[in-house]
Image (cartoon, coloured by chain):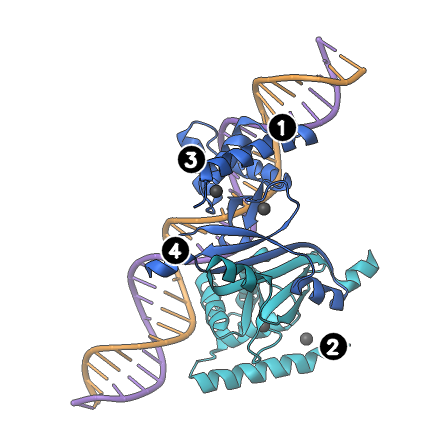
Chain colours: A cyan, B blue, C purple, D orange
Amino acid sequence: MHDHASCIRAALAHAESHCAREGLQLTPVRLRVLEILLEGHRALGAYEILDRLRDEGLGGQPPVVYRALDFLLRAGLVHRIETLNAFAACAHAGKGHVPVFLICRQCRHVIETPAPAGGQLERAAEGAGFAIETTVREAEGLCADCRIAA
Amino acid sequence: MHDHASCIRAALAHAESHCAREGLQLTPVRLRVLEILLEGHRALGAYEILDRLRDEGLGGQPPVVYRALDFLLRAGLVHRIETLNAFAACAHAGKGHVPVFLICRQCRHVIETPAPAGGQLERAAEGAGFAIETTVREAEGLCADCRIAA
DNA sequence: GTCGTTCTGTTATAATATAACTCGCTTGGC
DNA sequence: GCCAAGCGAGTTATATTATAACAGAACGAC
Ligand SMILES: [Zn+2]
Ligand SMILES: [Zn+2]
Ligand SMILES: [Zn+2]
Ligand SMILES: [Zn+2]
């Protein structure tokens, strides 16, 4: 069983120390967005996050949440899930990694697993003389729980 | 050097025979959208395609182009590029494949290479009991030409 | 013919994302 | 103390991407 409470604590502790070390400001809005994303290993759309912020009186317009997400993305604390146009807190903060996502189409849970370097993308790129800067690896399907439930 | 004229001819021939075989209707709008995407190995947004169609008097509203794209996607003749929210004609039509895309951020050229099965995504999924249905593998960076030009 | 299906046309709107400008706060120089 | 620079947040407006919902044409099945 996954101890999510300690999972959240660890992520927040990492975020604070990382920002302190790098001279980045983890402001209330930014922290709150991270906390919301950390509540579950799920991807949330920017406007879902925005609704939450609004309920809490923390900034009611799109730019607020998009700026916070932009900060968290650049700090490596959050990943963008391209398939869903949504965002998920990094589950491996601090361990420099190329994320791979397994996205359940039923419960929307997102499993992030670290990928070793030197996979297909890298080999394909090398053959083509292509210089990779960022990569996206996402799979959609059914997670173990939803397979059993089906 | 890439013989793109014959590349287009082959893709169109495949599209026609594939649709005939499967009982799918490659109507004028659908064919034209495919032709537009085949003009270059580039990704086009739905509204870029729509502008082209409009200029040609072929259907001026978003649903027209989205429906044509939906058809072409399901027929496997076109791929969606999640990173760009855009679409590119399949460069390996007919050869059942899992596409991998190398996307140049400068010239927007898209290189499609076929991926062998059994990569990182599949291994990660197996370990998690996750049943993959679709995968997205995209890399953004600089293509060989743009690296030289830089 | 007329019914069901498929494709297209059209209007309207939803969902996602950014531009551009304002303000308040901090901080450091002077 | 005062000012300027920088940064973050607030706000308005708008751009970009995508879909819902319904109306009309075209076609073959019966
Ligand atoms: Zn957890
Ligand atoms: Zn991560
Ligand atoms: Zn070609
Ligand atoms: Zn392809």
- Label 3 to label 4: alpha-carbon separation: 27 Å
Query: Disc 1 designates what residue?
Result: B25
Vertical position of residue B21 compared to residue A136: above or below: above
Q: Quadrant of ligand 1?
A: bottom right
Which mark identifies residue B145? 4
Along the line of sight, which residue is nearer the eye, A35 or B64?
A: B64
Q: Is mark 2 within 8 Å of ligand 1?
A: yes
Q: Upstream in the sequence, badge 1 or badge 4?
A: 1
Position in image of residue A76 (x %, y %): 51, 74
The chain identifier of the residue carrying mark 3 reads: B
Question: Which class describes the residues within 10 Å of circle 3: few (<14), some (14-19), or many (20+)?
Answer: some
Camera-near label (1 vs 2) is 1
Looking at the rendered structure, the secondary structure element under dot 3 is helix
Residue B45 visible, this orientation: yes
Eye-nearest disc, 2 or 3: 3
Q: Which mark is residue A2?
A: 2
Circle 4: residue type? Asp
Image quadrant in which you'd find residue B138: bottom right
Report the side of B127 relative to B98 (left or right).
right
